[in-house]
Image: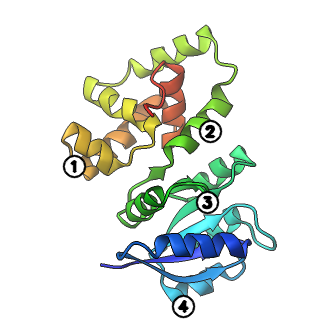
Amino acid sequence: MTIRVLLVDDEVLVRDAVENLLGAFEEIEVVGGRDNGAGIVEVALELRPDVVLMDLEMPVVDGIEATKALRRMDAPPEVVVLTAWRREDAVLQSLEAGASGFLEKRASPEEFRRAVRAAEEGDSFMSPRSTRELIESFTADAKGSQQRRARARIRALTPRELEVAKLVPSGATNGEIGERLHLSPATVKQYVSAIADKLGVTGRIQIATILTRAGYGPDL
């Protein structure tokens, strides 16, 4: 099955580079490109992408608003945010808007492939290096008291949940965690949801931050 991808970035050189990069993978087809999020729903209805690779900072309509618009569709495509790391807060806002993951523009071809495939399969993808940098931006002032609070929070997890949670900061997808722990992706997804509920958070970045503060940082 071919995965249809729409590129949305205001830099034509970036769009061309990503299209050329993805062209090396037989299972991925770039069906179009746009320089901002204006009219993104109409574009999606016309081109029917499975996955949208979305820049954050663009003129007219930025990536966050475009992601919100796409996720309101009846059968929305998955959105993976492309970032150059100028605004960590915007990455979090895009995830809250419904993006399924994020990827650095400097990521390797294989990371692009993994991100597209994970999104199409309904999984989440967080570029490992990106995850580490984002977490570090939150934990730069982390001291002993933060570590104690984080460790107290993870005591609510079962041993199996802790096994899964420890792998989240690495940026591994549900499928990759499942392969390592001999679980199905659907089971891992259920574990991640349960972990988030027990920790009182809403997503993988928050889980990764708490685990990093507790001493279980990205295994890169």
Residue 208 shows up from this direction: yes
- Pointer 2: what residue? 134
Q: Nearer the viewer, residue 23 or 62?
A: 23
How far apart are the two marked residues, 2 and 3, measured between alpha carbons?
A: 14 Å
> How far from the left and from the top, in percent, is residue 75?
45, 76
**Label total for image:** 4
Secondary structure beneath disc 1? loop
Query: Could you tell me the amino acid type at mark 2?
Result: Leu
Secondary structure beneath disc 3? strand
Q: Is residue 170 left or right of residue 92?
A: left
Q: Nearer the viewer, residue 193 or 166?
A: 166
State which tag comes first along the sequence, 3 or 1: 3
Instruction: Indicate which disc residue 218 carries.
Output: none
- Pointer 1: what residue? 184
**Closer to viewer: mark 2 or mark 1:** 2
How far apart are the two marked residues, 4 and 1, measured between alpha carbons?
A: 34 Å
How far apart are the two marked residues, 3 and 1, measured between alpha carbons?
A: 28 Å
Secondary structure beneath disc 2? helix
**Closer to viewer: mark 4 or mark 3:** 3
- Pointer 3: what residue? 82
Instruction: Indicate which disc residue 46 carries.
Output: 4
Query: Could you tell me the amino acid type at mark 4?
Result: Glu
Marks 2 and 1 in Cβ contact (< 8 Å): no
What crowding class fits label 1: few (fewer than 14 Cα within 10 Å), some (14-19), or many (20 or more)?
A: some
What crowding class fits label 3: few (fewer than 14 Cα within 10 Å), some (14-19), or many (20 or more)?
A: many
State which tag comes first along the sequence, 4 or 1: 4
> How far from the left and from the top, in percent, is residue 56?
69, 61
